Amino acid sequence: MNIDQTLDAKGMACPMPVVRARKVMKEMEAGQVLEIEATDKGSVADLAAWSKSGGHELIEHTENAGVFTFLIRKG
C-alpha cells in the first residue's frame, strides 16, 4: 500500500482529527492515500462517517496500543 501523506492526530479530541484530515485531503489528488493516526476513541466513528460522506474510501482501520490508524483513499 502506497501512503501519500500521514496525519498525526494523536492527542487531539474530536472533531479535530476530522478537521485536520479534511484540510490535508483538500491538498491531495484523487486516488491518493492518507494515513491518519489518532488516539481519541470518537475518531473511529467520526472518520468513518466523514470519509463516506465526503466520497472517500476507508481502506483500513486498525487499533494498536490505543492508537487508531486509518487509511483513506481520496475520492
Image (cartoon, helix red, strand yellow):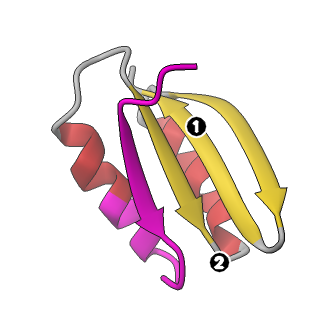
At label 2, which amino acid type do we have? Asp
Residue at x 22%, y 31% (from the top left corner): 28
Q: Relative to residue 62, is residue 46 drawn left or right? A: left
Disc on res. 12: none
Q: Is residue 64 above or below residue 60?
A: below
Q: Indicate the secondary structure of the residue bearing disc 2.
A: loop
Q: Is residue 48 above or below residue 19?
A: above
Q: Relative to residue 68, is residue 35 drawn left or right? A: left
Residue at x 83%, y 71% (from the top left corner): 65
Res. 52 in view: no
Q: Earlier in the sequence, mark 1 or mark 2?
A: 2
Check residue 62 for magenta coloring.
no
Q: Residues within 10 Å of mark 2 (few under 14, many from 20)?
A: some
Q: Circle 1 is placed at which residue position?
A: 71
Residue at x 58%, y 68% (from the top left corner): 38
**Residue 61 rendering spot, x and y as whole percentages:** 73, 43
Q: What is the tally of numbered marks visible in this picture?
A: 2
Nearest the viewer among 29 and 19 is 29
> How far, Cα to Cα, is label 1 from label 2?
16 Å
Res. 7 in view: yes
Residue at x 79%, y 74% (from the top left corner): 66
At label 1, which amino acid type do we have? Leu
**Residue furthest top as drawn:** 31
**Residue 41 rendering spot, x and y as whole percentages:** 73, 74
**Residue 75 rendering spot, x and y as whole percentages:** 39, 20
Quadrant of the rendered structure where residue 55 is? top left
Q: Is residue 1 above or below residue 44?
A: above
Q: Circle 2 is placed at which residue position?
A: 40
**Residue 7 rendering spot, x and y as whole percentages:** 40, 56
Q: Which residues are magenta?
A: 1-20
